[in-house]
Image (spheres, helix red, strand yellow):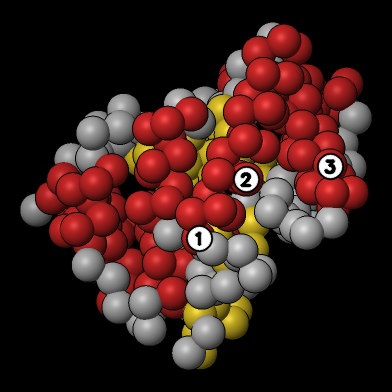
């Protein structure tokens, strides 16, 4: 059972951040290409080598401007381009997972949207194989009802395409009007060797996710208790506005749970 904790984003110069993570006892970080893929291959390799030396697991979040089911073909091609650019950097970083929000339903039926996303994933996977990149596409469970990305949709893609996934517990909660059945979720994902996950508290409306919030201790304790109950290996990336602080809170709480 390998459970890792870390923030979304460095928040400072990358190498300095890695040493700070190590000093705090954190052992994961998600590199965020929010608006664009900004890192050179040379810089990515240096960061990846240092992270490996410090035993810090890296992952990458591709830019947010992605819609693999857009009605505009150009937007689909640009979306794939951004994801594949992220995959290239992830390869140099030695990061296994490239996380992204897949698509919006728009006026498509959910099944038609699924088929379009599946086709795009398979096309990108072929490119990844041809380039020899040792990375996995990790489609994220999404927080808005207008977005493709329920847990069942993502896990169906995993089964049919052999891609990977990122389970965002806060997004699931927001999408379901503030409720989440952890037993149901973990029964679906516990078979995987390692689970990549996101968490924070979250503000939502009837349409789903509105914004991430600082992580409430009660919500964090509930999640960690289920991670312990199902004995899963998992990386928990915190996406709150105070991600570093909340990641450290999670690590300390996890230690207390395991002392019982």
Crowding at label 1, few (<14), some or many (≥20) Cα neighbours within 10 Å? Answer: some
Name the residue at 84% across, 49% down. 73
Answer with left or right where residue 173 lies relative to residue 224.
right
Label 2 Cα neighbours within 10 Å, binned few <14 / some 14-19 / many ≥20: some
Which mark, residue 120?
Answer: none
In this figure, which residue is indicated by the disc labeled 1? 110
Q: Eyeballing the image, is 43 above or below 126?
A: below
- Residue 77 shows which numbered tag? 3
Mark closer to the observer (3, 2): 2
Residue 44, x across and y down, in percent:
79, 27
Residue at x 36%, y 82% (from the top left corner)? 178
SS for dot 3: helix
Mark closer to the chain start, 1 or 2: 1
Pointer 3 or 2: first along the chain: 3
Q: In this view, does 203 lie above or below 230?
A: below
The secondary element bearing badge 1 is classed as: helix
Q: Residue at x 36, y 52 (%)?
A: 152
User: Residue at the location (38% across, 55% down)?
Assistant: 151
Q: Can residue 249 be seen in this view?
A: no
Quarter of the view holding residue 8: bottom right
Q: Could you say where residue 251 lies in the image, as x and y percent from the top left?
A: 38, 52
């Amino acid at each position: 059972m390998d459970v890792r904790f870390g923030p979304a984003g460095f928040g400072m110069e990358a190498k300095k951040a890695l040493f700070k993570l190590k000093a705090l006892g954190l052992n994961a970080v998600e590199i965020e290409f929010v608006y664009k893929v900004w890192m050179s291959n040379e810089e990515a390799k240096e960061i990846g080598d240092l992270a490996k030396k410090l035993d810090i697991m890296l992952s990458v979040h591709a830019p947010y401007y992605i819609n693999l089911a857009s009605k505009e073909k150009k937007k689909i091609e640009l979306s794939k381009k951004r994801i594949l650019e992220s995959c290239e950097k992830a390869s140099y970083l030695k990061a296994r997972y490239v996380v992204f929000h897949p698509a919006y339903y728009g006026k498509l039926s959910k099944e038609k949207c699924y088929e379009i996303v599946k086709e795009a994933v398979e096309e990108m996977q072929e490119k990844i194989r041809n380039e020899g990149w040792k990375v996995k596409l990790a489609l994220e469970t999404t927080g808005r009802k207008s977005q493709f990305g329920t847990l069942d949709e993502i896990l169906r893609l995993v089964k049919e395409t052999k891609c990977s996934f990122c389970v965002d517990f806060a997004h699931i909660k927001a999408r379901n009007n503030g409720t989440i059945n952890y037993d149901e979720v973990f029964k679906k994902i516990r078979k995987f060797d390692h689970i990549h996950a996101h968490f924070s508290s979250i503000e939502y409306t009837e349409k789903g996710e509105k914004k991430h919030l600082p992580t409430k201790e009660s919500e964090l304790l509930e999640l960690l208790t289920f991670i312990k109950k199902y004995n899963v290996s998992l990386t928990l990336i915190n996406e709150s506005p105070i991600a570093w602080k909340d990641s450290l809170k999670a690590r300390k709480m996890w230690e207390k749970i395991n002392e019982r």
